[in-house]
Image (tube, helix red, strand yellow):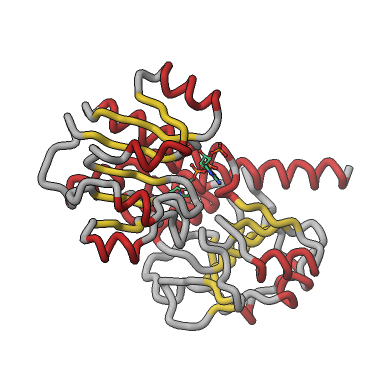
Amino acid sequence: MLTGMQIAIIGGDARQLEVIKKLTEQDAKLSLAGFGQLDHAFSGAVKEKMDEIDFSEIDSIILPVSGTNTEGKVEAIFSNEDIMLTHDHLAATPAHCTVYSGISNAYLNEITKHSNRRLVKLFERDDVAIYNSIPTVEGTIMMAIQHTDFTIHGSKVMVLGLGRTGMSVARTFRALGADVRVGVRKTEHIARITEMGMKPFHLDELVGKVKDIDICINTIPVAIVTAKVIASMPAHTLILDLASKPGGTDFRYAEKRGIKALLAPGLPGIVAPKTAGQIMAGVLTQLLQEDLEKRKGKAK
Ligand code: NAP
């Protein structure tokens, strides 16, 4: 239980509602900023404006998946006010206050560092990334179905990268009957792909390997699907780029060549916001519990 914890939830979308639900069930006291247009009320949670929150009482701050933008603005779809998180807010919190965010940027890194507050980037955690790969794959399948006139079954699908997302994508497309080939750079990944019954290749050979593919799914967050690679693909190939913005595809060249290439960010929040929210809520509850126990241990 999180009895005695005072948490500020600042901004977010439908995913944050699952977090609020779970944390109030755990008896935490919540200050909600950026939820002014939300009709629903949660017992134990109070909607406040940023300047109404007493930050000196706040044990943890929970930001949305995107954190802040580079000027400190926090996305808040349940509010039409500008919600800003500043160094002054953090400096007003107790020293033990931890900031939780999905991802970070230079601004958020700087204000947490400068105020000496701990920043936890949830999406860097293996558990969150692996759980998140489940709705990501479902969204990828949805996009593949929407943007092709052939079945996944029997089609030649190339997956680039065998990280937390690539592994789930490759396995699921294979389970749907696709002929899956996976491009990687490590010998242990070549071995793993072979063990999984798929066709591995080294990324150095990428240009030669795309000549007969139907779908190319990229999970590598560097420029990998270059103009040279795209020039070697059949004209009907669909490129789905899952890597974080700006993706790893030369979209300009793909358009010029008439190849459909789609950047598909944030699929969990689009196809399964409830599940995506529950994933974050589950991990946050565990981490907040650990924070609380640590603090109680120190107080003894
Ligand atoms: P990950 O576990 O770190 O996997 C990244 C993969 O990219 C690994 O296979 C890694 O290979 C490879 N890679 C990285 N840099 C490379 C380089 N310079 N050359 C060749 N290969 C390289 O990350 P993840 O959790 O799977 O996420 C992958 C991407 O998808 C991220 O950009 C993430 O933000 C994004 N994502 C998007 C969605 C969505 O909804 N679209 C959902 C989840 C994640 P090595 O092991 O050899 O380094």
Q: Is residue 299 above or below residue 108?
A: above
Q: Position of residue 50 (x, y in %)?
A: 60, 78
Frontmost residue, 111 versus 94: 111
Where is residue 48? Give x, y as percent. 56, 75
Where residue 126 appears, x then y in whole percent? 57, 38
Q: Quadrant of the C terminus?
A: top right
Tell me if 10 is positioned left or right of 210 in this view: right
Give the total of numbered labels: 0
Q: Quadrant of residue 187?
A: top right
- Residue 100, position in %: x, y? 63, 56
Q: Residue at coordinates 43% horizontally, 81% vertically from top-left?
A: 80
* Farthest-out residue, left: 149
> The N terminus is located in which quarter?
top right
State whether residue 259 is above or below residue 205. Answer: below
Q: Is residue 44 left or right of residue 236?
A: right
Q: Residue at x 45, y 76 (%)?
A: 36
- Judge from the rendering whether residue 286 lies leftward or rightward of residue 249; answer left or right: right
Q: Is residue 269 above or below residue 290?
A: below
Q: Nearer the viewer, residue 79 or 181?
A: 181
Q: Residue at x 63, y 74 (%)?
A: 85
Q: Residue at x 36, y 36 (%)?
A: 169
